[in-house]
Amino acid sequence: MSWNTYSIDDRKLTVITGLAIVLIIVSLYIQSKLVLFLSIFILTVLSCNQFYLKRVGKQLFFENIAEKHRYFVNDKGQWTITIRNEGYPILNAKLKIYFDQCVIPEGKTLEPNLSLNEISLRFSIFARQTKQIIVPFSANRRGIAQIHKLEFRIPSLLGFGETVLESKWYLNQLAVVYPEPIPVKGLKEQLSVHQGIYSAPSSYYEDRLGPTGTRNYISSDSFNRIHWKASARKQELQTMIYEKISEKGWMIALNISDGHSITGNLEKLLSSITEMAYFAYKNQIPFSLCINVRTAGSTPFLYLPKGEGKEHLQTVLETIASISSQNISLPYEQMLSFYSKHLEYQPIFIHAGIRRDDTNRLLLNLSNKGGKLFNLKIEEDHGLLSELDIHHERRALLC
């Protein structure tokens, strides 16, 4: 592990060094061997002190192992940091650990810090020794916690000055704290019955890519459903039978913006989407997720393709956990435009967050393609999912 290293000198050291040099001059003038010996001894000790400060920590290492652990709120966990010293011994140093505030250390006193949790430990390690530092914590709130920095403050042998070591990079141990769901009213009533690829015992829609069989023609059958080859074989008209199918696909689109800032309902919106993700998992409903957080790549925002099952749910929860007020947002209308042109279309589109007139126009275009629109909004301590009728909203505003 590489460190940023710098030394902090004590002003007393400069004064003592200057005094020792003056004593050497005085000892030569008065021809005193005792004073000369004492002054040289002081300079030697001070030189050893400075040599120690420059060399200590040069061979201090720890294993930056990549680990990811997942927690629910109030779960217990810990970070394990293994330190190995191949250089000079370190005595009575102060170790500071900085990490995200979605976890809280247990049994440690927190230092005041606006953006990160900070704890201090006393640390000593001898040459060619390995030590483990255990940092127990409790999951506090949704988010991804990581140790941002280790800082060693190593005092000199005489107590004059110190050497400071700061880790150059974040530690690779991650603690993912899943979001907590909140109730969403209206969710159970919004199952889709639109056309799609999933088999259904009864549906208005059929898979026209290939018939599953034939039956005798009846007068109410459409003429274009006649299977001419089968009819020729059996010498009577045969009607093609297609598999009944339905679609359960959802697209959940979250707008985290409110003008030029992040919406104040971010946490409740994310908790509502968490509840919807659990509901979709239990009812085997495939869904995709779009969030207008700017990312690099061919898709310029957070996008999870349609999926279902436990792995998809875990990916969704981790994605939601990663959202923070520090994220840079993409204009929501730009995300909707990209979705309509490039991404897989879903028959049910669920909007969450702030809507403007430009947003409504784009949502109306999605509705005109045959999709069904729903709106997720926050009411006190729960979410409310309702069908979105933009035409009705406009008429109400005009009245």
Image (cartoon, rainbow, N blue to C red):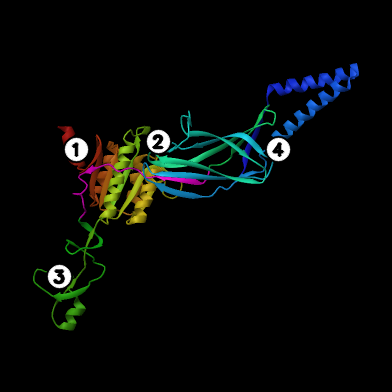
Closer mark to the observer between disc 4 and disc 2: 4
Amino acid type shown at disc 2: Ser
Callouts 3 and 1 close, C-beta under 8 Å: no
Amino acid type shown at disc 4: Arg
Q: CA distance from mark 4 to mark 3?
A: 91 Å
**Residue 128 point in image, percent of width and height:** 66, 46
Tag 3 residue: 223
Q: Is residue 228 above or below residue 66?
A: below
Q: Earlier in the sequence, mark 4 or mark 3?
A: 4
Q: Earlier in the sequence, mark 1 or mark 4?
A: 4
Tag 2 residue: 325
Amino acid type shown at disc 3: Phe
Residues in magenta, as a range: 171-192
Assess whether residue 178 is covered by the magenta stretch. Answer: yes
Q: Is residue 387 visible in the rendered structure shown here?
A: no
Closer mark to the observer between disc 1 and disc 4: 4
- Dominant secondary-structure state across the stretch colored magenta: loop
Tag 4 residue: 55
Residue at 44 percent across and 49 percent down: it is 69
Callouts 1 and 2 close, C-beta under 8 Å: no
Q: Earlier in the sequence, mark 3 or mark 2?
A: 3
Q: CA distance from mark 4 to mark 2?
A: 42 Å
**Is residue 6 shown left or right of residue 150?**
right
Q: Earlier in the sequence, mark 4 or mark 2?
A: 4
Tag 1 residue: 393
